[in-house]
Each structure stands twice: as structure tokens, then as C-alpha cells.
Image: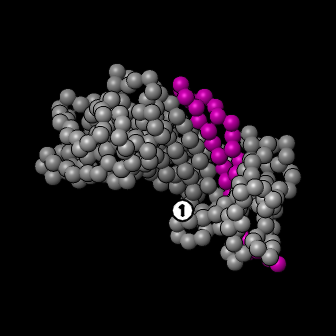
Amino acid sequence: TTSWDELGYPLESRGSVVGVAGTTAAYELINAHDGTWDFAFGVRNEYFSPLTRVMLQRGKTLDADAVFDLDFATAIVPVPKPLAVHGLATNEVVDVAIYYATGAFAGLAVGPQTVPTTTPDVATSYDALPPASQIAGDRYRATFVAEKDKRSAIVRTIEASFHAAIELDLTLPPVMGPPVATAKKTPTSVTVSAHAPVLAGAAYYALVATVMLNERDRRAFRITFPPALVAETWEVTPDLSAVAGFDPSWLLPQDSSVDITAVAIEAPVALGDGTRTRTSAHKITTTPTP
């Protein structure tokens, strides 16, 4: 019944799954350089299904083309673990990515391949490996992003890392209010001044001024500060022209709208044998004035 092969990627998230024809599948492993790696392979019945088998190949030296002979009849059988997310607003959806990582921030995708669009609560599951297959450095790394769409002004996130699989019951942070900001043109660039609203529970805040240069590239200034200074108005784009090595081309260009984002970041709290952190962000867009 298997029709999809899953690969664990070492340095960034999975790019795609691989269709299997018979017993053969070709793939390219990205971002792997010469060295010693742990490799992870999994299979799914369909691309949207949970993993049914996982193979871990520990401590493999990669310095030339390699061949792996994998017998999934003796593979690890994952166990589904319940996962619940609470606090979604109407028309808001949550994107979930959970990776089983062996020393990096990415790895084998064990999170749900499809997530229900129910609100205010979402109930699903992720694929857990049995404790006997784990070693000390292994981690589940999970990211939850709640927003109405990819261009949403309001974004709330939860990030978690833990070793032993647990039932996850998570609540999104409160919604952040919009920043108050002005953007002014100068003879050479744009300057941004802003202050962030108060959000209960924040350990620190950030203000970010961003200009998209094209579809892929952006230029941004970011300043962080503690809750005691949240009422202050901050120069998000300070004058750094006198700093040795500063390049004026790094400044925000004059003829572009500026995205200004206020972010509230909570302190990490315990989650199983690991931690979880929540953030809440609100973005506005402004056109610089003379």
C-alpha cells in the first residue's frame, strides 16, 4: 500500500516527497556536505497519510555516492501522538511542521501532512518514534504558525523542542495590537519611528521595519527591548552612517512602502523534557512622507 517515500533533510525543511514506482525511487539530498550524518527514511501510503515505517541509519560517512539497502519489513513503526491547538480566530488556520531531528533543526517530517481548518480548536496527531530508537541528541522540533493567509497582518506562533514524544495540547498567544509608526523620507533613505502596544506575558518586544526589494529579497532593521521600555518610541532605523564599515546601501530605499511589525515574545516555558516559546506579531504598511 506504500506509494510515497519521505527523506530527512539535514539543514532545512523538506522540499518534497518522492513518488515510488515498484521498489525504486530516485531523489536528491540537498544541503549535505562531506561528513558523518544520521539518515532517516520513511514511507507513507499516500502523501497526506501518516508515516507507516521509518528507517534510521546512524553515523554514516558521506564522501562519495552512496547506496542504502533498506528493509522496511524490519523498520520502526511510528505511534500516533495526539496534538491539539486552541485559540484560533474565525477564518484563521494553523500551519504545523514537526520534524524528528538528530542534531540539526530539520529532519524527518513527522508532523501532520494535513491539518483540519476548524476553529477555535484543532485536533490531529503526529508520528512518534518509540523510545528504543532514540539517542540522547534526538529532538522533535515543532513550529505552529496561525494566520488568515500568507499576507496576514496578524501572525501568532508557537515553537517547541523536546526529546521524548508527548501528547501536545497547546494554546496560541493573545493577538498583538498594531504598532504606532511613522516613516519619513530623508535625502538618502527612509527613517522609521515606532512604538509597540503592551501585550500581557511578553518577556521582550521587537519592532521591525522591512522593505521588499523584489519577490525574494528584503531589507530590514530590527530593534528589541524589555517590557519596561514598551511605552518608548524607538528609532527603528538609527543613523549608523558614522559607524566604521557601515554601507549606505543597507538603508531602506526611499520609493517603497515600509512594513512595520510589532512582535511580543514570551519567555520559554517547560514542555515535557523540552521547552516551548510563543510569539504574537502585528504588521502595518505605511508610505513614507517627506
Badge 1 is on which residue? Answer: 150
Is 143 inside the magenta-drawn segment? no
Q: In this view of the protein, can residue 35 be seen by the observer?
A: yes
Which amino acid, mark 1?
Lys
Q: Main secondary structure of the magenta part?
A: strand
Q: Secondary structure at mark 1?
A: loop
Q: Residue at x 41, y 36 (%)?
A: 100
Instruction: Report the side of 177 relative to 62 (left or right).
Output: right
Comparing 81 with 261, the one in front is: 261
Comparing 212 with 119, the one in front is: 212
Q: Residue at x 46, y 37 (%)?
A: 104
Comparing 228 with 247, the one in front is: 247
Magenta stretch, residue numbers? 263-290
**Of all residues shown, which one is farthest toward the right?**
232
Q: Where is 182 relative to 49, above or below?
A: below
Q: Residue at x 56, y 71 (%)?
A: 214
Q: Where is 278 relative to 102, above or below?
A: below
Q: Where is 182 relative to 224, above or below?
A: below
